[in-house]
Amino acid sequence: MATEHQETERSYDGALRTPLAADGLPGAASVRREPVVRLDAVYFDTPDLRLLRRGVTLRRRTGGHDAGWHLKTPAPDGSRTETRLPADAGERDGPPEELLARAAIHARGGRLDAVAHLRTRREPTLLLDEDGRTLAEIVRDTVSAEQLGGTGSTGDPATRPVDWTETEVELGEAGPELLDAVEERLLADGLRPSDSPTKLGRALKARLDAIPGGAGSAPPPGPDTCDSVGDYLTAYLRSHIAALESLDAAVRLDEPDSVHRMRVHIRRLRSVLAAHRRFLRRDAVEDVDKELRRLGRILGRARDAEVMGEQLATAASDLPGDLRPRATRRLLETVFRDRYASAWRAAVEAMERPRYFALVDALEDLAADPPLRGRARRGRKQARKVMEKQRKRVVKRLRPALAQPAGHDRDVALHRARKAAKRARYAAESSEPLLKKRARRQAKHAKRIHKALGDHQDAAVGETTLHEVAAQAPPDIAFALGVLRSRQRAGEESQLSEAAKAGRKLGL
């Protein structure tokens, strides 16, 4: 089982001429020199260094207290998340499957092989507080790096061994003010911040520079202000694209609720793109929306099986004893577990294909440079128009849907109203930085509508699903499933009443 560690550190070229003293450093009471450590690490990446170009490193290290497999990924705040596994977790010819899954979105389908071998002589120094707790670790590293798997010829500068000395400062139980104070000491002693945030980046600099766009780029920050539709739309898109990408590994590893969470971010992105289409160049977002819809449907099959299985199995437990509730529940759990597993495998297979990685690239381009039209520079008035259009769309669909007689046509109409309510909610939530209370109010009422209609839709789907399962079940279980099917609409009146109440708040 992997463990995670949040790492905040800074690197500097060179080493101190004189030992660091604790005097004047915030919270520091003493300094303790630690024994010299020999580290040996092999780094893995694609031939074109896709991990490194995104600030990600994957290595297997021997020596030191943290020997083992390490995957480090950058965080928006400048720190890095380090995921660790024991040294024996890997396969003979490469990294362990869990770390491969966590690195997949960065590798973009590329094979990971050994690209560098780094040997380090480390001289650690600990900064301690009065209670002996480690506030920071300062290390002098003498590094010798050898490139592996390169394509350059013998004597090519890109393949020659590289040696250097550097100083790293990693925070322990201290705040960033200590980092700043230590940095001031280091700079005063002649050190300078490293041009590369990682040892691997320095070791493979020549090879990285030879790759077009090799240095990569940091994720764009959100707008400093939110004075226009374009500002809040940009911030919203960047936030949900980053969240969607962060769930890639969780879905591959089948972590609880990960499929649902990724699907929600897809829905939010599609809803906001649709609600704000007049502010975006259509040709730049149509293909993205199409691919998001496709991915959402693939994930939806797994999510629907997961949710429906949980709901129906729980309902089976409430059956009378003579209807064999335990046997009925076990059957439903088995059926939907198999359906979920099949749908999840299909989703992961789709996420291994070039089409998925092309979508991820397109989303990153969208986040880096949203295709805004000139009118996106406008402010609250335009934001209100977006919200009002979506509000009217909900009312237009919900009123006639509620007026229809029970039956398939009403179910379809209510489902369409539900989707409109979701879009109205997400449009309002994205507008909240500009419209404050008005946006929060619309989001609240739209959420009530789509939650109530969501329960109604689940009941409609449950009826159909139970009919399908009953057709393949033993006669006694089939009868119990029929009873469950007859109960699916028990809450229909209250669901529609709740939707109507929320609709009146929205202007129905």
Image (tube, grey):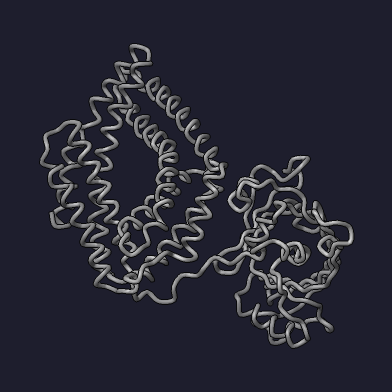
Q: Residue furthest right?
A: 155
Residue closest to the eye, 470 or 161: 161
Asked whether residue 420 appears in the rendered view, the answer is: yes
Q: Quadrant of the N terminus?
A: top right
Question: Is residue 438 left or right of 273 when viewed as pictured?
Answer: left
Q: Quadrant of residue 218?
A: bottom right
Q: Position of residue 298 (x, y in %)?
A: 44, 39
Q: Position of residue 290 (x, y in %)?
A: 40, 47
Question: Is residue 364 left or right of 300 when viewed as pictured?
Answer: right
Q: Residue furthest top?
A: 475
Query: Relative to 111, is 57 above or below?
Result: below
Asked whether residue 246 appears in the rendered view, the answer is: no
Q: Quadrant of residue 461?
A: top left
Query: Relative to 425, is 467 above or below?
Result: above
Residue drawn where x is 74% and y is 81% of the image: 192
Q: Position of residue 125 (x, y in %)?
A: 78, 73
Counting the numbered discs, the total is 0
Query: Relative to 158, is 149 above or below?
Result: above
Residue drawn where x is 27% and y is 34% of the image: 459
Q: Position of residue 404 (x, y in %)?
A: 12, 38
Question: Is residue 284 left or right of 199 when viewed as pictured?
Answer: left
Residue closest to the eye, 258 or 232: 232
